[in-house]
Image (cartoon, rainbow, N blue to C red):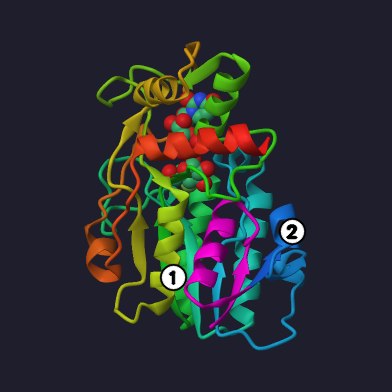
């Protein structure tokens, strides 16, 4: 299949393009920023916003990943988030692909724990709202689609990984702390989790990528699926894991809780296991180990 991959040069997108190629598909990348590893590679790419893209050749399907995705920024610039995330999706719908696999997010849920696809959706930040509205727009479009609600993507591919600067995500920040002996700030304490710090479901980017190939081929009746590891890791557990794997002692302190941060985001992944026959292979140790490897070899 000729697959338009919007945001295909990003952290998750790069891993998705690699899996698509392995499975014999032909990814066409549209991204505002094309990373160097694609410039030398075999892919077709267009460095532009999705909103400005018109295909030169017909496309069969689209994996729509391009989005503004930093939760804290969405609180500062909500209208920019709605503008980019909704208008890029509308553009993809106008291109009329036969199928759309949509990057949704655990951020659609809000407060709670062990979320199934039937759990209430009450997002507590603009990013989560933009993703939930995207899911609804897709339903209204009538196009065959599957919305994948990612939990916290992390880890690294072999030849690609996290390159965002300044870093906004917990594991890349911890890698910087381990490498450069910096202090890490844990956002919040005394929350209703097993040790009082935020709990997240870190999911290896390679596992997430494989789910997209299965999603493209899926012909069942479900339109929303969680993509997580099904296991939660608290901030204190994550710091211990990073210390262990990097063999560095991480200095950390407790800082104020981010108000838009749900205390716990952990997926129930029964549905995706059953429907896509997808099983995450990698543990939190693999994730941290691969992120550390990327940190050392690629920077
Ligand atoms: N955290 C810290 N200190 C930091 C950075 C993060 O304690 O310096 C904590 C946060 O409070 C949170 C956890 O680490 O509990 C993870 O935070 P990230 O910023 O790495 O990720 P988020 O959970 O905020 O958001 C990510 C993606 C979203 C997605 C969400 C789904 O960026 O796009 O996961 O779970 F919606």
Q: Is residue 125 visible?
A: no
Q: Is residue 93 visible?
A: yes
**For residue 224, above or below residue 173:** below
Image location (x, y in percent) of residue 155 = 48, 42
Which residue shows up at 48% across the image and 39% down it? Answer: 290
Residue that sits furthest to the bottom in the current view: 58
Q: Tags 1 and 2 in contact by the CB under 8 Å rule?
A: no
Image location (x, y in percent) of residue 200 = 37, 37
Q: Which residue is mark 1?
A: 213
Circle 2 SS class: loop
Circle 1 SS class: helix
Which residue shows up at 44% across the image and 75% down it? Answer: 216
Relative horizontal placement of residue 259, taking residue 27 as reference (left or right): left
**Which of the 4 image quarters holds residue 194?**
top left
Image location (x, y in percent) of residue 269 = 26, 55
The numbered mark at residue 148 is none
**For residue 59, above or below residue 76:** below
- In-front residue for pair 108/247: 247
CA distance separating discs 1 and 2: 23 Å
Q: Which residues are magenta?
A: 1-27
Magenta region includes residue 151: no
Which residue shows up at 43% across the image and 39% down it? Answer: 287
Magenta region includes residue 12: yes
The numbered mark at residue 32 is 2
């Amino acid at each position: 299949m000729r697959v338009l991959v919007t945001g295909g040069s990003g952290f998750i997108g790069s891993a998705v393009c690699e899996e698509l190629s392995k499975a014999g598909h032909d990814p066409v990348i549209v991204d505002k920023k094309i990373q160097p590893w694609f410039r030398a590679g075999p892919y077709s790419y267009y460095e532009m916003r999705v909103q400005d893209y018109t295909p030169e050749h017909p496309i069969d399907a689209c994996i729509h990943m391009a989005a503004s995705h930093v939760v804290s920024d969405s609180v500062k610039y909500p209208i920019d988030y709605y503008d980019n995330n909704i208008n890029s999706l509308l553009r993809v719908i106008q291109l009329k692909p036969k199928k759309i696999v949509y990057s949704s997010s655990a951020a659609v849920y809000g407060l709670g724990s062990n979320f199934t696809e039937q759990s209430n959706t009450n997002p507590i930040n603009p990013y989560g709202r933009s993703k939930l509205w995207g899911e609804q727009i897709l339903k209204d479009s009538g196009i065959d689609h599957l919305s994948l609600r990612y939990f916290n993507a992390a880890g690294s591919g072999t030849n690609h990984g996290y390159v965002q600067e300044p870093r906004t995500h917990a594991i890349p920040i911890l890698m910087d702390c381990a490498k450069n002996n910096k202090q890490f700030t844990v956002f919040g304490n005394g929350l209703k989790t097993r040790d009082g710090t935020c709990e997240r479901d870190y999911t290896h980017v390679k596992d997430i990528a494989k789910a997209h190939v299965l999603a493209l081929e899926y012909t069942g009746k479900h339109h929303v699926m969680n993509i997580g590891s099904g296991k939660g890791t608290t901030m204190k557990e994550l710091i211990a894991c990073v210390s262990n794997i990097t063999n560095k002692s991480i200095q950390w302190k407790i800082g104020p809780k981010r108000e838009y941060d749900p205390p716990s985001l952990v997926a129930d992944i029964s549905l995706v296991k059953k429907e896509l026959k997808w099983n995450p292979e990698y543990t939190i140790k693999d994730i941290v180990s691969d992120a550390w490897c990327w940190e050392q070899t690629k920077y």
